[in-house]
Structure formats: C-alpha cells, structure tokens
Amino acid sequence: MSIRAEDPQGLQYDRRTILNVPNQLTTIRLILAIVLFFLIAHEQYWWSTWLFIVAAGTDWIDGFWARRYNQVTTLGRILDPFVDKIIICGTFIFLAALSEKGSGLTPAMAVVVVGRELMVTALRSFLEQQGADFSATLSGKLKMVLQCVAAPVSLFTLWHVKDGIAQPAWLPPLLTISVWGAVLLTVLSGVAYVFAAIRLLRR
C-alpha cells in the first residue's frame, strides 16, 4: 500500500517520490562536492576545475526536471539550496586557504561569502515561516553566476601555478574581475535581502 503525505503547499505525494530524479541528482552533486574538496586538498587543480563546473553547472538540471515533470518535493526544496551552499562556500573556504599560492581569494572574502549565505538562510527560514515570499533577487542570481565563474578560474590559475605552466594573458585579469565581482555582488545581494526582509516585517 502506498503511503501518502502532504507537503506545506498542500500537494499530496507518495513518500517514494523522495527518490525521484531531481533528488537523486542533488544527492549526486553532494557526493561530487565531497570528491571536489578531496581533490583540492590534494592539489589536483586541473580535475578540480572541471569537477566544480560539473557539480555547480548541473544545478539547473534538477530544478528544471522538478518543475517540468512536477516532481517538486519538500526534501528537494531543502536539499537543493543546501548542496548549492556546500559547493560554493566549501570551495571558497578551500581557495581562501590557498591565497598565498595564488588563488586570488583571501580568508576575508570567504568570511563574506559564508556569512552572507548564513544570514540569508536565517532570514528566509524565519520569513517563510511567517508566510512571506522571500524569493531570490536578481542580484542574488547574478552573485551565484559570478561565484560559479570565480571558483573554476581560481582553480585553473592554481593549476598553472602548481605545474609551472605559463598563464594565458587573459587569466589574471579574469581572476581579479570575477573574484572581486563575486564578492561585491555577494555584499550587495546581502544588503538587498536585508532591506527586503525589513519591508516584509513592516507589513
């Protein structure tokens, strides 16, 4: 006999749907994140670059699949952003530890990125419990894009430095622009979320 439950939006689903394709993809991305951190820790920057691109770049697939085939679940709404934060924050922390090797990221930058994610997660959790809509802003989406550019560019730079390979002329400026752009948008999007939260609370 199938056991059915109800999610917060009133959608009934079989408990077995927690093993649907989007949730399986998200779980695979979590495993890829663990492998990614292992590779970075062992200075396998070439493989780390491509693994990050795969892990972060396939994020849209599980979201598209869930919406397209009506497979959105409570677990998926929790797990997907959690895995996103693990991949981004974890990679930035590892890269910040490699700042002296030329990663382009400092510990302070990692603190900004992680702090912003913790703050937004706390605000979203509180406000959505109150029934408010706290959807992602444009600046938040652009921030994610730049972070997903900065991380592989940094790893690609580390690969050149470690193996003593001459860097292409475009790599250093791209590293600087992507890293600082990601940090700037991280701050701006965080401020935007704070003001959005204040407006919602005033209502």
Image (cartoon, rainbow, N blue to C red):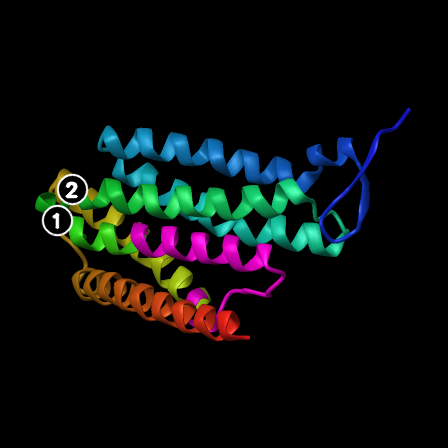
In the image: residue 158, left or right of residue 101: right
Asked if residue 142 is positioned above or below residue 62 in the image, the reply reads below
Does the magenta run of residues contain 98?
Answer: no
| Residue 179, percent from left and from top | 24, 61
Residue 97 at least partly seen = yes
**Residue at image x 48%, y 51%?**
57
Residue 103 at least partly seen = no
The crowding category of the residue bearing disc 2, from other C-alpha atoms within 10 Å (few below 14, some 14 to 19, many at least 20), is: many
Does the magenta run of residues contain 127?
Answer: yes
Q: Which mark is residue 102?
A: 1
In this view, the residue in front, 143 or 2, is 2
Q: Quadrant of residue 43?
A: top left
In this view, the residue in front, 134 or 177, is 134
Do the numbered discs 1 and 2 sit on residues whose CB atoms are within 8 Å?
Answer: yes
Residue type, mark 2 in image: Leu
State which quarter of the image contains the N terminus. top right
Helix, strand or loop under label 2: loop
Which-is-in-front pick, marks 1 and 2? 2
Q: Residue furthest left?
A: 100
| Residue 123, percent from left and from top | 45, 58
Asked if residue 185 is positioned above or below residue 163 in the image, the reply reads below
Which residue range is magenta in the image?
114-140
| Residue 24, percent from left and from top | 62, 35
**Residue at image x 29%, y 66%?**
187
Residue type, mark 1 in image: Gly
Q: How far apart are labels 1 and 2 at the CA level?
A: 7 Å
| Residue 110, percent from left and from top | 24, 50
